[in-house]
Image (cartoon, rainbow, N blue to C red):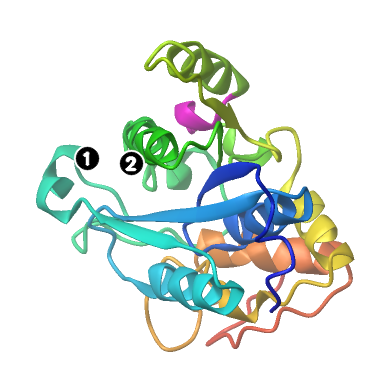
Amino acid sequence: MDNQYSCSSRKAVVVYSGGMDSFTVLHHVRALGYNAAAISFNYGQRHSRELECAAKVSAGLGIEHKIVDLSSIAGIFGDSALTSTGTDVPEGNYGTENMKQTVVPNRNMVMLSLAVSYALSKKADVVFYGAHAGDHVLYPDCRPEFVEAINGVTRLCDWQPVKVEAPWLHASKADILRRGLAMELDYSDTWTCYNGRKHSCGRCSACLERLQAFAANQACDPLIYEDQAPI
């Protein structure tokens, strides 16, 4: 991976989980000509595979990457399949009930607030994150209304206004992947599975959504799956 965009004077911070959506956002932002820095969060998630991917990609791109440790306050987020080993990982296609198991209340508000602080310290005037249309059904902090409202706050939180951008806000996961494939991105260094084992499970809701996005684009997912369920 090259570093062809790093000399730009335009600065941006990308909230980078290490998943395929934020991976695509990061490369999209660099393609726009921004000098991007990445910020990731350890919020007590049940595994660190995404964070490992984020660190590897950032190092390969030669960009600054900060991992903020929120594990000491993980208890404030409550029980979620993403944070609690006592909560079952939802399997099967996403629906209202199994999506509810993956809600981490107010997570994006917390993360975006810290990302904005990071942006201010770097004199960057925009923060990007990877909310997309498929998240609107249940996740309140991925809705267009949320993005609009938080921008009202970030314009006022400091003398320097910071804009929050969600470039995939009205795009599906298949749309996001299509854009990434057009940029010839390699998705082998991304992680989506809710489980943190050696290979992706292929059964959880996150895996199925990812596989469906690849199928919609008639592309092959470079990850290895324990069990690739029919999609």
Label 2 crowd (10 A; few <14 / some 14-19 / many >=20):
many
Residue 92 appears at what percent x and percent y? 55, 60
Label 1 crowd (10 A; few <14 / some 14-19 / many >=20):
some
Please, is residue 136 above or below residue 179 in the view? above
Please, is residue 110 above or below residue 15 in the view? above
Residue 228 shown left or right of residue 16 in the figure: right
Residue of label 2? 104
> Magenta-highlighted stretch: main secondary structure?
helix
Residue 153 shown left or right of residue 80 in the figure: right
Residue of label 1? 77
Q: Does 41 lie within the magenta span?
A: no
Q: Give the residues in magenta.
A: 139-143
Residue at image position (17%, 55%) is 71
The label on residue 190 is none
Residue at image position (63%, 76%) is 229
**Helix, strand, or loop for circle 2?**
loop
Residue at image position (39%, 48%) is 102
Residue at image position (39%, 56%) is 40
The quadrant holding residue 132 is top right
The quadrant holding residue 7 is bottom right
Q: Choose the circle earlier in sequence order: 1 or 2.
A: 1
Q: Are marks 1 and 2 in contact (CB under 8 Å)?
A: yes
Does any portion of residue 222 appear in the rendered image?
yes
**Helix, strand, or loop for circle 1?**
helix
Please, is residue 209 above or below residue 132 in the view? below
Identify which amino acid the numbered label 1 is placed on.
Phe
Q: Does 141 lie within the magenta span?
A: yes
What's the distance in space between the residues labelled 1 and 2, CA to CA? Answer: 6 Å
Quick one: 134 or 2, which is closer to the camera?
A: 2
